[in-house]
Image (cartoon, rainbow, N blue to C red):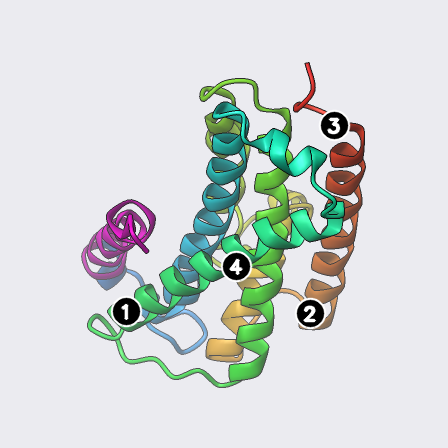
């Protein structure tokens, strides 16, 4: 919170631009999707996009910052078990993601009227997505050797997955081949699960989405724990 212009404001400014450009200027030319205006359709996706970026960037910058300043060695020699270290960084990512998501949601109310149909499902999907990408940020930070390394994954992997994850469109609008390819994108399940909580519509089963997210969370937790146990990226 001491550096809120860096942690909270950028995501808000970026999302407002999306609302104006895609929601109002372009969205006004697009016919309703399953009974909802284009602006209403993209709001859940834009909130999820902000959440994912915030959770990932918070953990990758925090952990790599500790490595860069060498105070990560205090964690290595401390009696704190690795699961506590992981939980600490993930908690930071989840809190920042929650704050950014809440701000983006309230800003969206200035552009369109939208009601959450399944509040607890939305909170659950937001929590799972924040945990997953906090773990992904930690994984990136463990392997990062310089500041360039912490931007490679967001630029070449995370951003394409987000834009191809159904934020701005329904995969039902795609040709069969690309619809099948999209189903291998984990972000598709986060966006659709979150959209279901808002609008009650989805391209994939919410139960399937939860299952896939839980599998990725368990997998990344195990990988992060194993890497921390080995001291990967922290011991010369």
Residues at badges 2 and 4 in contact (C-beta under 8 Å)? no
Q: Mark 3 and mark 1: span between their CA atoms?
A: 43 Å
Residue 225 in sight in this render: yes
What label does residue 108 carry, if any? 1
How busy is the neighbourhood of tag 2: few (under 14 within 10 Å), some, or many (20 plus)? some
How busy is the neighbourhood of tag 3: few (under 14 within 10 Å), some, or many (20 plus)? some
Does the magenta segment cover residue 171?
no
Q: Is residue 77 left or right of residue 106?
A: right
**Viewer-nearest of discs 3 and 1:** 3
Q: Position of residue 191 (x, y in %)?
A: 53, 60
- Identify the residue shown where x is 44% and y is 53%: 49
* Quadrant containing the C terminus in the rendered view: top right
Q: Which comes sooner in the sequence, label 3 or label 4? A: 4
The residue carrying mark 4 is 94
Please identify the dominant SS of the magenta region. helix
- Identify the residue shown where x is 70% and y is 58%: 213
Does the magenta segment cover residue 14?
yes
């Amino acid at each position: 919170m001491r550096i809120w212009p860096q942690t909270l404001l950028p995501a808000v400014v970026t999302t407002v631009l999306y609302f104006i450009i895609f929601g109002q200027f372009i969205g006004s030319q697009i016919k309703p999707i399953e009974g909802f205006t284009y602006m209403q359709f993209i709001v859940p996706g834009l909130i999820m996009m902000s959440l994912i970026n915030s959770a990932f960037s918070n953990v990758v910058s925090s952990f790599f910052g500790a490595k860069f300043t060498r105070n990560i060695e205090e964690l290595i020699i401390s009696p704190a078990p690795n699961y506590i270290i992981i939980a600490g960084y993930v908690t930071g990512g989840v809190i920042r993601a929650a704050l950014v998501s809440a701000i983006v949601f309230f800003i969206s109310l200035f552009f369109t009227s939208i009601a959450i149909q399944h509040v607890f499902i939305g909170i659950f999907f937001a929590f799972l997505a924040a945990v997953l990408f906090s773990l992904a940020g930690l994984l990136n930070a463990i392997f990062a050797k310089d500041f360039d390394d912490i931007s490679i994954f967001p630029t070449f992997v995370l951003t394409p997955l987000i834009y191809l994850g159904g934020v701005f469109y329904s995969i039902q609008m795609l040709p069969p081949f690309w619809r099948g390819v999209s189903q291998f994108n984990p972000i598709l399940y986060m966006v659709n699960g979150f959209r279901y909580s808002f609008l009650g519509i989805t391209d994939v089963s919410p139960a399937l989405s939860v299952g896939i997210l839980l599998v990725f969370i368990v997998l990344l937790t195990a990988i992060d724990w194993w890497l921390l146990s080995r001291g990967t990226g922290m011991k010369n």
